[in-house]
Amino acid sequence: MICIPIVATTNERALERMAVALPQADLVELRIDFIEEVDLEKLLSVKKGRFLVTARSKAEGGHFRGSETERIALLRQAVRMGADLVDVELGTDEALTAMLVEEILREGNRTKLIVSSHDFTGTPPFRTLQDLCTRCAARGADIVKIVTSADSMEDNLIILRLIAWARENGHDIIALCMRERGAISRVMAPLIGSYLTFAALGEGEESAPGQLTAPEMQEILRILGNGA
């Protein structure tokens, strides 16, 4: 599954980019932390595909400018409006995360919860990643997301091993390495069981370092899928 993030700074620009992304994507991620004065009602009324709503905190590489309470309130609104998935960080206050989980339950579990952890400094040892995965699941995650940074090609092997371990232990997982050396993990992850992989709508529209574009990702996966 390919997820295309929308990193526009206005609601109008986001709608324009969504119209381009939806025909190409299995899932579109609305990075509402990029958008000034975000209007979720306007954005989510365009229900022509599946949407993941993310309001990434500054602590984990995001751009959200309000308080933590305001940030989680937006994710709760997204749940009420029928977002297919929402993403909250493991580092978020447990009480606020619990409120988001309760909102999902009230809305009949229509929305899947991603609990995520991002490391912009490197790739921790495998046991540390196992612990992070377990902690994310304990927060109520339907899908665990573990993202690290690749300092070496070997770091890709660690994150790909984590995917296999998580699935063996009953966890749906998104896992990959950022940076140029992590690009191979973005390609291989969905082939070995990652819930999805991310690809930018175009050059300059990446939401994280090392993302391929959607056409590049589609072509590579097509070739690998055909065994060529």
Image (cartoon, rainbow, N blue to C red):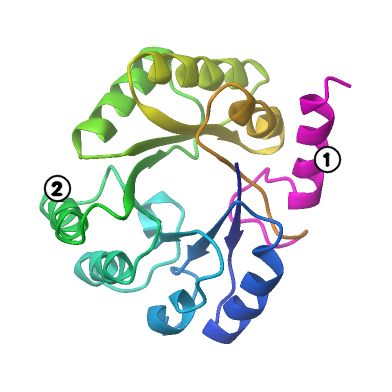
Residue at figure coordinates x 38%, y 22% from the top left: 129
Q: Is residue 16 above or below residue 25?
A: below
Q: Nearer the viewer, residue 130 or 226?
A: 226
Residue at x-position 79% and y-position 25%: 224
Screen quadrant of the C terminus: top right
**The magenta stretch spans which residues?**
204-228
Instruction: Say which label, 1 or 2, has the lower sequence index.
Output: 2
Residue situated furthest right in the rendering: 228
Helix, strand or loop status at disc 1: helix
Badge 1 crowding class, 10 Å Cα cut-off, few under 14, some 14 to 19, many 20 or more, is: few
- Type of residue at label 2? Glu
Q: Nearer the viewer, residue 190 or 147?
A: 190
- Does residue 183 sit above or below 71 in this rendering? above
Mark in the foreground, 1 or 2: 1
Q: Residues within 10 Å of mark 2 (few under 14, many from 20)?
A: few
Label pair 1/2, CB-CB below 8 angstroms: no
Q: Which residue is identified by label 2?
A: 94
Is residue 85 rendered magenta in the image? no
Image spot of residue 196 (x, y percent): 55, 39
> Is residue 186 rendered to the left or right of residue 88?
right
Coordinates of residue 1 in the picture (x, y in percent): 60, 41
User: To which quarter of the image does residue 135 belong?
Assistant: top left
Element type where label 2 sits in the image: helix
Q: Label 1: which residue?
A: 219
Residue for point 45% across, 65% down: 63
Question: Could you tell me the amino acid type at mark 1?
Answer: Glu
Name the residue located 64 percent from the left edge and 64 percent from the top edge. Answer: 22
Q: Position of residue 97 (x, y in %)?
A: 19, 52
- The answer for how far apart the CA atoms under marks 1 and 2 are is 41 Å
Q: Which of 192 and 123 lies nearest the eye of the viewer?
A: 192
